Image (spheres, grey):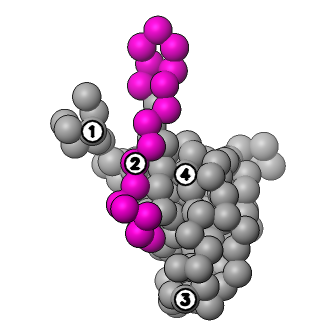
Amino acid sequence: MCGRFTLKEEKKVKDQFNVDISPSFNITPGTKILTIDNQNKTRFLNWGYRPIWAKDNFNLINARSETILEKPSFKNARKCLIVADGYYEWKKEIKKIPYYFHMNNSLFFFGGLFNDISGCCIVTKEAEKSLAD
């Protein structure tokens, strides 16, 4: 599950999307993040998805792809892309150790869902064996 990611390549973002960002090495839930909506427009959305019927303090940051079609939370959600250049996953040994994954400082996208009321969440899936270890 993705709980932290980065978007630090401001020149690449400017060149590709004509959007100015402040580089961030630790994007956390609740932050305004750069997305591309289902009409191919860039938008800054809050990272935290709340279904229309939920209370204010109910925010989802991830949605499991395996069950997304079954969940009433996402019934009226729209698709988006979330722009990133890296993400962190933690491995618990004696203490939690963050591992940073990136694609040679290239931009990439997480699949996401959003609504206009609250914000967006990242669609996740079970990790491939090579990443799960």
Asked whether disc 2 touches disc 3, contact meaning CB atoms under 8 Å apart, the reply is no
Could you tell me the amino acid type at mark 3? Asp
Asked whether disc 1 touches disc 4, contact meaning CB atoms under 8 Å apart, the reply is no
Give the alpha-carbon distance from disc 3 to disc 1, as whole Å: 31 Å
Circle nearer the N terminus (3, 4): 4
Could you tell me the amino acid type at mark 2? Phe
Please indicate, yes or no, whether residue 46 appears anywhere in the rendered image.
no
Give the alpha-carbon distance from disc 3 to disc 4, as whole Å: 21 Å
Residue 131: which disc? 1
Q: Would you name the residue on which mark 2 appears? A: 101
Circle nearer the N terminus (1, 2): 2
Circle nearer the N terminus (2, 3): 3
Secondary element at image label 2: strand
* Rendering coords of residue 62 (x, y %): 51, 48
Q: Nearer the viewer, residue 44 or 63?
A: 44
Please, is residue 89 above or below residue 116 in the view? above
Give the alpha-carbon distance from disc 2 to disc 3, as whole Å: 23 Å
